[in-house]
Amino acid sequence: MPLLSVLICRTGPAVIRSSFLPHTRQCLARSGSDRQLTIARYSRNARNNTRTESFAPRETIVPTEVQGIVVESGYIDPSKIWRSLLFTAAFSTGSFIGVSIWEYETIRSRAMQALRSKLSVNWFKERMKHQRQEMEQWRKDLTGWWNKLSPGERIFAPICALNVIVYGLWRIPSLAPTMVKYFASNPAAKAVCWPMFLSTFSHYSLFHILANMYVLHSFSHAAVATLGREQFLGVYLSAGVIASFASHVFKTVTRQPGLSLGASGTIMGILAYVCSQYPDTQLSILFLPMYTFSAGAAIKVIMGIDLAGVLLGWRIFDHAAHLGGALFGLFWCHFGSQNVWPLREYFVGYWHELRGPPKK
């Protein structure tokens, strides 16, 4: 098992929220010709002002404009929790239905390829296809590299690529309003649902994305080896939205509006699953490899820290999102994988009838 990183972090409301509220010292500045976004630190007075604004009456709630970027803040309508809940349930269900269809289509495709390879009528076509592949050396090299990857790395690579692309989009100043609106989860915004999902692929700082991708790479191999790539992807996507929903609930109950982004809520789901599935596995901290501890103890400590962050009101990270993702990972380890995942067979049966017999 790779070394455990302690740098799991989903940027929480204290860090990002104050970046865009008018009463804080954080600002979105344009530096030189690059016109890149920069984030400054906030003061204790800023936090106090933010809390006061969150208790403001509904009538006083208006979008805040900072450096030309409109950020909705202030009062959080509790009725939006139902929208978030329905989206979480629908998206999670849809994710597992989608990966079930993917699994079915993969098996069906492999079976048809095996059948067609035995037919002489397809021999010439397969031979020509093989020759074209040999003529394209770059494709051959890429295929060879891909085949050398472990199943976990084959899932990690596209997920990491998506996160890197979104990170690059944050660097384009003209896209800043769009990124804030759709790639940062904010329960006070009009667009509530899809940002719950898109924010799980969104990172603003280089350190943030490097830390999260390192942890995901460390645990994806064990998770995919146990769950399979389809079930892993279903758990990964669902854990992210559930983590965002937990963050929404916490912000609504405590009346603390703000933006959150990052993949750590999702990664906490994978981490909790692996540590619960293999509790006796020995882990170590990246920069302190001489100290080892069990995976079971590690997840208890990490969740304990996040629980303390929720109860004590820490605003360094989005601790509620961490806990939401981790609890879903524990649920899937002890119940979901054995009782929920097999239910896909009923839907796959209907899908098989809808698809009909394969074409010859």
Image (tube, rainbow, N blue to C red):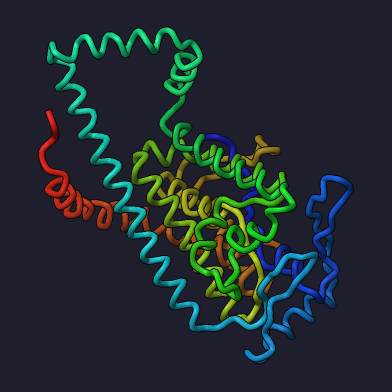
Residue 161: quadrant of the picture: top right
- Is 104 on the left or on the right of 173, as rendered? left
Q: Nearer the viewer, residue 201 or 34?
A: 34
Q: Nearer the viewer, residue 98 or 316?
A: 98
Is 66 above or below relative to 262? below
Does residue 301 appear anywhere in the picture? Answer: no
- Is 231 on the left or on the right of 195, as rendered? left
Where residue 180 appears, x then y in whole percent?
65, 61
What residue sits 79% from the left and 80% below the top? Answer: 48
What residue sits 57% from the left and 52% below the top? Answer: 263
Does residue 266 appear anywhere in the picture? Answer: yes
Where residue 22 appears, x then y in whole percent?
80, 74
- Is 118 on the left or on the right of 79, as rendered? left
| Image quadrant occupied by the C terminus | top left
Is 30 above or below relative to 78? above
Where residue 202 appears, x then y in whole percent?
60, 52
* Residue lying at the far right of the rendered structure: 32
Q: Nearer the viewer, residue 111 or 344?
A: 111
Residue 19: quadrant of the picture: bottom right
What residue sits 23% from the left and 52% below the top? Answer: 344
Is 244 above or below relative to 118? below
